[in-house]
Image (cartoon, rainbow, N blue to C red):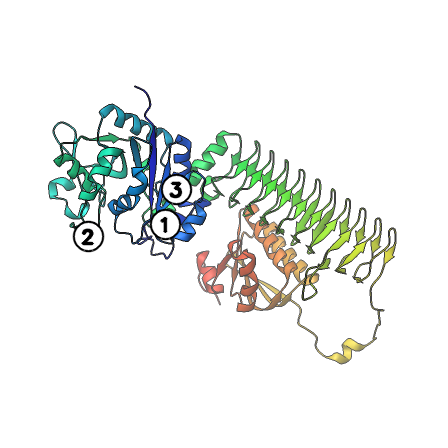
Amino acid sequence: MAEQEFSVLILAAGKATRFKSEHSKMLHRLAGRALGEYVLETVLGINPQRIYMVIGHEAEEVRKAFAHSRITLIEQKPQLGTGHALLVARPELAHCPSATVLVLVGDAPLLRGETLRALLAAHQRARAAATILTTRFENPYGYGRIVRARSGQVRAIVEEKVCTPAQRRIREINSGIICFARAPLLAHLPALSSDNAQKEYLLTDLVEIFNRQRLKVAAFPVADAREVLGVNDRVELAQMEKVLRRRKAEALMRDGITIVNPECTYIDDQVEVGRDTVIEPGVSLLGTTRVGSACALRPYSTIIDSVLGDRVTVRPYCMIRACEIHSDVILGPFAHLRDGAVIEQNARIGNFVEVKKSRVGRGTKASHLSYLGDAVLGEQVNVGAGTVTCNYDGEKKNPTHIEDGVFVGSGSMLVAPVRIGKGSYVAAGSTITEDVPPESLALGRARQTNKEGWARTRGQGKPTAGITVREVGPVTVFSVSGRITMGDPATQLGQKIRQALEGGRKQLVVNLADVVYIDSAGMGALVGATMAARKSGGQLKLASIPPKVRDLLEPTGLCRVFEICHDEAAALASFDVGRHA
């Protein structure tokens, strides 16, 4: 039998009532895409003659999201049920060239094109007025039941609210997907009524109308019930997200990508990854990201709408958005790249370095604590720790140009617009406000003055960190006070914790109750100590974190790194150690 031409009508007008949302269900995000995109992609893949989509709630936003040259959008206003949606679409369907109209729900993201083709073929073989895609659930609560005659034909679809006890025992349910012969559909649509329990015009009422007219209504069961599952609330959205992300991870693993723990790795549907790349736990690859071959993506990094070349290493806790990373680059840990940054081959962007809307040349290194914004860096540039391109003058952003082979000393402020010539040196601690000629040395420091004896007359200076160590049973407690900052305070804390680990003390608590300030070096010391404890099979917990210190932890996401207890007693109790004097 020759394949019959067909058109598709997608029902996408309803408000997300059970989502308790002001937005259309079709626009809610699922594995990186709008929910409605999945069915639309499936429909485009089976190549119907016409595609109609009935929209209603938040119509303008839905129109923008699903604008496509092949789709005719029909607005249903007001929304009075699925049958009413077809009544609104009736003028378009009257001019449709197809003898068959396939009506789909817009919220079934697992629906396959092969299933729809099989449904169309079954409908053609049965010569039915309507063929319903059905499936079987062990617990069909909430779904319309398929009531069949002895001949196997469908006599009615009965909604849960009005089912008899016998009908509630039926396991075959309506998917909401129905294939219609166009002529009887158009002829009998006007017979629909809102005189029912829902007080709406229901598409399913056409089954009884067709039966009264002695028109054939068939059913086509699909074996995998997951295919026809709709997404009715946010709980089901989360469940569907898990299914889709697991499916994506399995497809990548079969293509030669290592995903260490798929259960805590988040990869969007459109992401592409090359072979022999290793993706470690907590990594998120989102949007249209493309990752090359043999890359190493370390824990808890997030990469959004970016392109990575081959053999790129992304160390832990990096954030990369809308960037282009060339091959053999090393990033992080704790690097932030955004807004079109381009990092060329063999470059190094290190810990706590932010690159915004900048191009970093081949072999260039910015290893520590720097900000590169609206800048162009040439090849083999060295950017010292603490360097900042001061790009904003209060009104507009200004560019910084650093040519090939430049050495920028630590703690330098490059006040844009400024150009540092090829092969030049910028002395550490300089503020550069004028262009630097090639092969020059630029110094922009104030003259140093030493005031001998000043510290003795000043009185007590700012408190530095004090660290006391005591043992409470098997637990070693480090009580820290004052300021944990770059230099001795951070170094001493890290050393004392490592000494305890080397001495076989595996259960550690750091009490921060008396800490007044902690900088990035102090944070780094705590992160390093936490990782060292885990590597040696131990545990390190933070206790009594002051509000000011917690305010520093939360924006960086570091709260996820540490195990945090309310106070020292709670930390000891978590190690099964009672309160000691």
Circles 1 and 3 in contact, beta carbons < 8 Å: no
Provide the residue designation for mark 1.
25
Task: Specify the amino acid type for callout 1.
Answer: Lys
Task: Specify the amino acid type for callout 3.
Answer: Thr
Give the percent coordinates (x, y) of residue 241: 40, 44
Mark 1 to mark 2 CA distance (whole Å): 22 Å
Give the percent coordinates (x, y) of residue 79: 29, 52
Mark 3 to mark 2 CA distance (whole Å): 28 Å
Q: Is residue 530 above or below residue 478?
A: above
Give the percent coordinates (x, y) of residue 524: 63, 56
User: Few, some or many C-alpha atoms within 10 Å of disc 2 (few <14, some 14-19, many ≥20)?
Assistant: few
Give the percent coordinates (x, y) of residue 85: 28, 46
* SS label for mark 3: strand
Q: Residue at x 41, y 49 (%)?
A: 62
User: Few, some or many C-alpha atoms within 10 Å of disc 1 (few <14, some 14-19, many ≥20)?
Assistant: many
Quadrant location, the N terminus: top left
Of 318 and 177, nearer the camera is: 177
Mark 1 to mark 3 CA distance (whole Å): 19 Å
The residue mark sitting in front, 1 or 3, is: 3
User: Mark 3 vs mark 2: which is more N-terminal?
Assistant: 3
Q: Is residue 249 left or right of residue 470?
A: left
Residue 457 at least partly seen: yes
User: Mark 1 vs mark 3: which is more N-terminal?
Assistant: 1
Provide the residue designation for mark 2.
199
Provide the residue designation for mark 3.
72
User: Mark 1 vs mark 2: which is more N-terminal?
Assistant: 1
* SS label for mark 1: helix
Q: Is residue 355 above or below residue 144?
A: below
Circles 3 and 2 in contact, beta carbons < 8 Å: no
Task: Specify the amino acid type for callout 2.
Answer: Lys
